[in-house]
Image (spheres, helix red, strand yellow):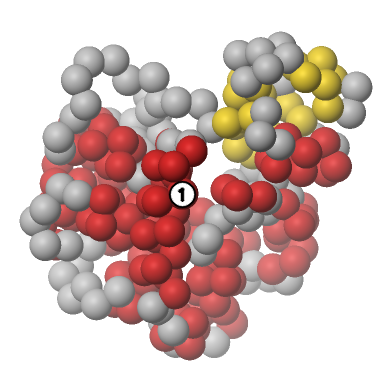
Amino acid sequence: MRLIDDPAAARAALTSPDFVVPAPGEPGKPARTGIRWLRANVGRFTDGEAHERRRAAQVAVLTAIPLDALRSGGSAHPVETLARAMGVTEPVVDLVRDAAQAYQPGTGDEPRADAAVDELVAVFGGVFDEAAAARIGILVQACDATATLIDRARHRSIDAVLRDDPPVAATKRQALVTTSINGMLIEAGEVVRVRLAGDLAFGAGARRCPGRAHALALSEQSST
């Protein structure tokens, strides 16, 4: 899989309507529970109207969280701090880790993730709907990336980490049409990796990470 590394070209790929997030490619009937249900109901793996609606749900949850509540987390895992700010009193860090390790299709132990997602739905009211998926998705997507950002920023500035060693180094995009970016011909249907670093560490365009300010606030735990 080819990598789009040049910052200008990466921004073009992230913001162009000619590129979409590759679908999870999971055959069979839509899952009603577990990790496949989560993927099918968060904005991360969708485009168009469904993405806009699900992203808006996550933005609403994040907007209700005071950033100062995240800065005062001390040495707690960022998921614990974030969950507490969302009103969760149950211990969920291990459940979120179990879900996160298989969040991307084909990357982990899905039965373990299935059980974790179902328990997390119970924590958020017991209904398998997009509202629960939005909350779980926020925690899952913050789990490894934010913890890694905090760890790497212990002895370097956050700007240096995001520029030189971002916790999420790249993301995938699929071309809808044959196009050219910075002299690279990309065929329709081709999936490419797009480097995320510096100003693009949290993405760009309509799919820019809605939790950027929250991740940065959580990262301040390491300096308090």
Instruction: Please name the amino acid that badge 1 sits on.
Output: Glu
Q: What is the number of callouts on the image?
A: 1
Label 1 residue SS = helix
Quadrant of the snapshot with the N terminus: top right
Farthest front residue?
49
In-image side of 55 versus 125 (left or right): right
**Quarter assignment of residue 125:** bottom left
Q: In the image, residue 214 lies at what x, y percent? A: 51, 71
**Quarter assignment of residue 151:** bottom right
Q: In the image, residue 140 lies at what x, y percent? A: 36, 52
For the point 30% across and 42% down, the residue is: 41
In-image side of 5 versus 165 (left or right): right
In-image side of 35 versus 182 (left or right): left
Quadrant of the snapshot with the C terminus: bottom right
Q: Is residue 140 visible?
A: no
For the point 85% across and 42% down, the residue is: 8
Give neighbour class at mark 1: few <14, some 14-19, many 20+ (Cα, 10 Å). some
Looking at the image, residue 211 lies above or below residue 137 = below
In-image side of 147 versus 28 (left or right): right
Looking at the image, residue 131 lies above or below residue 108 = below
Task: Looking at the picture, tell me which residue is in the foreground, 111 or 24.
Answer: 24
Task: Looking at the picture, tell me which residue is in the foreground, 143 or 86.
Answer: 86
Looking at the image, residue 160 lies above or below residue 67 = above
Q: Is residue 105 visible?
A: yes
For the point 40% across and 51% down, the residue is: 53
Q: In the image, residue 85 lies at what x, y percent? A: 33, 78
Q: In the image, residue 51 lies at what x, y percent? A: 44, 44
Q: From the image, tell me which residue sits under label 1.
A: 52
For the point 48% across and 38% down, the residue is: 48
